[in-house]
Amino acid sequence: MRLILLALVVLAFPTFANSNTESIAEEEMSAKAWLESMSQALQTKQYKSSIIQLQADHIRPLVYLHGTVNNKEVAFLEYLNGPPKNAVRVADTVTFIEHDQPAYSINAPRIQGIWPTIFATDVSSLEQGYQFVLGGRSRIAGRPGQMIRIIPVDDNRFMSQVWIDMDTRLPLRYDMVNQDKQLIEQMMVIELLELNEPAKILIEAEKQGLPPVMNPAERIKGQNWEFSWLPAGFHMVVKDHHRLIGSDESVEYIALSDGLVNISVYVARMGDSPMPDELITRNGLSMVVEQVGNVEVVAVGKVPAETLNRIAKSLILK
Amino acid sequence: MLKSGQEWVSSAVDGEVDAKTLAELAADENSHKQWQNYHMIGDAMRGELPQTIDLDLTANIAAAIELEPAIMAPQTETVSTHDKVESTVAPEVKKDNVVPFFKQFGQYAIAATVAMVAIVGVQNYGQEQNADSPLPVLNTRPLVGTASPVSLQTGAVQNQSSVSNDNVVEQRRRINSYIQDHMLQQRLNSGVVVQHNDGIDKNVNN
């Protein structure tokens, strides 16, 4: 009797196992593995996505094309409403083509303003400040999407969620929400097409001579600023001395980043008119002004105002 | 009248009265509440109620309209002499109209500041080229927007500020330049992150 039972088990098990291996591979993918395969897909796939961006009560439609031409990554972003605004990326050069000024190029790994740059680069570097958690599945742009939560390890920044297409592994939706779970901004794909060959416009873009990259070496070195405290994962990206755009006020500038969020810290002489201590826009951008003697420290970024406050207070000059 | 009035309203809601009766009904203010209730009952029976029921929509709208900053054209003298009511109301409304978005303390939305970005930005591009700025003159409004005009739609916020107009304009201009600069830097720095990351990181840790 026992033998028969054993035989049954032996016979039954492989069939059971076989039928499930495929789904298990997908089921067991960790949140990080999903993000990494998204990163890979963003760099290698050829695709066209139509996206809408929601911010407060603004909706912006855009189209993003990506492909490989002559072994170079080429991408094109077009902003569909209002005055024409485009950006083209060929390998590491991003050129902005806008109606009201001559086109210019900068050095950048991605076109800023669509998916966070980090999504297509080194996702694992986010782990210092965030945890990746596997969420549920839902259908977006007619495709099944796996949701991954990017949860901050502290209260110093906002939470993000990304939905990844289970077929192409490209992002379908990206939400940033505040502590009260209110939406700060959202990017949502409404149509995603995977292409077998690069789109015509990308081939054209690769052929076109784009304006040369502006030389960023003109930056004037700033003072040796340091921070006695920064949220986990944040580090200084740039320190310099420049004039604020749109005014001739000169400022000491420090850029901070944790990969997903960028914070700017300015040190300037106090203006004639008092600045508000704290400002919050409905799209999550906060600004905090800390006065030290006749100098004001201004911090701007998409994080809670308390974080900016703490950062501004912990600035020290070595 | 009461009972029959209710029946009127009821049949009007169901679309069973002629235009004349409807006009009479519209004139009868007492029935308005009834009208609303019947529609609500109808909606509930059809399962069409929204998630949150705003019970007195009309009152809310009226209140919102009252709070809306009015766009006042400069009044001619003839108007002020002829219409006393107008002239007494006008100065107050005008005052609100100047800076309806700012509160003195605490958190408040950036109001028209970002909407002003365009104007301030454009005005200053000319100057900027003369001043010798280390950064090239760029359009900082991001390709896919980052900031949006915030409180233009949020309704009127009472102006509790005692700051003079010049100061408010100056303040907005400065807030704008900081926010604009922040956006521009994000564009310029995106390429830097990879290159200088390590060196500066060490600095932080020291």
Image: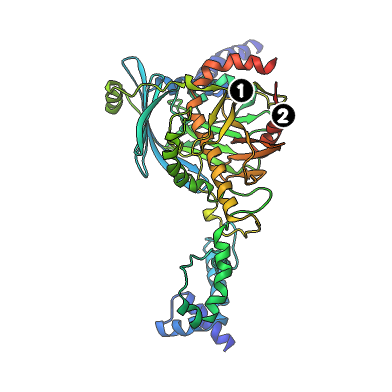
Which residue is depicted at the point 56% across and 73% down? Answer: B89
Q: Quick one: SS at disc 1? A: strand
* Labels 1 and 2 share a subunit: yes
Q: Position of residue A36 (x, y in %)?
A: 52, 20
- Chain holding disc 2: A
Give the label on residue A236, or none: 1
- The scheme the figure's colours follow is rainbow
Q: Is residue A242 visible?
A: yes
Query: Is residue A135 in view from this perspective?
Result: no
Q: Which residue is outermost to the bottom? A: B1
Residue B145 image point, x, y percent: 46, 39
N-term mark: 1 or 2: 1
Report the chain holding disc 1: A
User: Relative to A177, does residue B197 appear above or below in the rendering?
Assistant: above
Q: Position of residue A249 (x, y in %)?
A: 55, 36
Task: Inspect the image, locate mark 2, and give the three-letter code of the amino acid beneath it.
Answer: Ser
Q: Which mark is residue A252?
A: none
Tell me the quarter of the picture where residue A208 sits: top left
Q: Which quarter of the rendering shows the C terminus of chain B?
A: top right
Compare residues B3 and B61 and report the one nearer the observer. B61
For the residue pair B52 and B121, the one nearer the viewer reads as B121
Residue B160 against residue A310 in the figure, above or below: below
Residue holding disc 2: A314
> Which x, y percent locates residue B50?
55, 58
Alpha carbons under labels 1 and 2: distance apart: 14 Å
How crowded pointer 2 is (Cα within 10 Å; few <14, some 14-19, many 20+) is rated as few
Residue occupying image coordinates x 53% and y 82%: B7
Under circle 2, the secondary element is loop
Q: Is residue B106 left or right of residue B144?
A: right
